[in-house]
Image: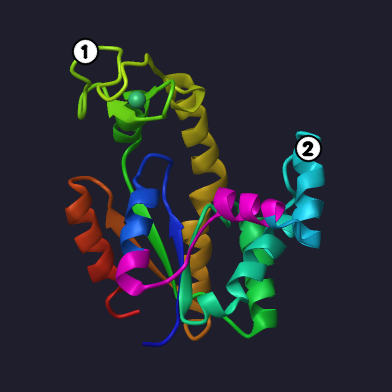
Amino acid sequence: MSELNLILLGPPGAGKGTQAERLVADFDLPYYATGDILRAAVKEESELGKEAKEYMDRGDLVPDEVMCRVVVERIDRPEARDGFVLDGFPRTIPQAEELGEALDNLGRHLTAVLLIDAPDEEVIRRLSGRRVCKDKGHVYHVDFDPPKNEGFCDQDGSPLIQRDDDKEETVGKRLEVYAAQTRPLVEYYANWAKADPKNAPVVRRIDGMGSVEDITARALAALADC
Ligand SMILES: [Zn+2]
């Protein structure tokens, strides 16, 4: 198999994380979720991790350029020789440009961009119905996976809460940000593929509705010839 350098795109709540876990197991590739690799860099106390931590300690966003270096430092490791699954970066066109340049410098290029799509009303339903147990973080859903006793965790009896991130108004705002900043990446990569098919990644869109198994089957089919 040649390299599979894959970016996952999709609105919050489309199931990117779940699908990523399945794809990395299937393809035997490392999974780089932005939040995770940022925390790992900070924990390793590398120069880069220390630099990122300064921003985080001040409550500032880690700048694109620093985040890009965190990502590329991982991609440059032997573990990612055959490819990687990247989730959460790039989120904007400037980040995508930054990443493209950095990969170029490594002599690498993106193979595919997989968009896992789901309509806004579905995303809102999935996320705003989520409840998390206060003690251990066990996850429920008021419609799809309700606890036996409403409002309490089946496993330890602790109260279930709705995280701020999952509140309907927050989900609405996250979707607006996605539509304004991240969704345009689909067109950005598609235009690039038209202009330079040899170097640009292929863009594949799959339907994020249905069971986890169905979506995985779609993702694997979409990536079969990449
Ligand atoms: Zn619990």
Label tally:
2
Q: In this view, does 222 lie to the left or right of 179?
A: left
Disc assigned to residue 57: 2
First in sequence, mark 2 or 1: give its number: 2
**Toward which corner of the image does residue 120 lie, by quadrant?**
top left
Amino acid marked by disc 1:
Asn
Q: Quadrant of ligand 1?
A: top left
Q: Where is residue 77 in the image (x, y as percent from the top left)?
A: 60, 76
Cβ of mark 2 under 8 Å from ligand 1: the answer is no
Q: Is the magenta stretch mostly helix, strand or loop?
A: helix
Q: From the viewer's perspective, is residue 109 above or below residue 132? A: below
Q: Name the residue under label 1.
A: 149
Q: Is mark 1 on a helix, strand or loop?
A: loop
Q: Where is residue 197 in the image (x, y as percent from the top left)?
A: 47, 82
Q: Quadrant of the C terminus?
A: bottom left
Residue positioned 41% across, 29% down in the render: 137
Amino acid marked by disc 2:
Asp
Residue 113 or 68: which is nearer the viewer?
68
Q: Position of residue 53 (x, y in %)?
A: 77, 46
Residue stretch rendered in magenta on the structure: 24-43
Q: From the viewer's perspective, is residue 15 above or below residue 142? A: below
Residue positioned 61% across, 68% down in the render: 74
* 11 within the magenta span: no
Q: Is residue 19 visible?
A: yes
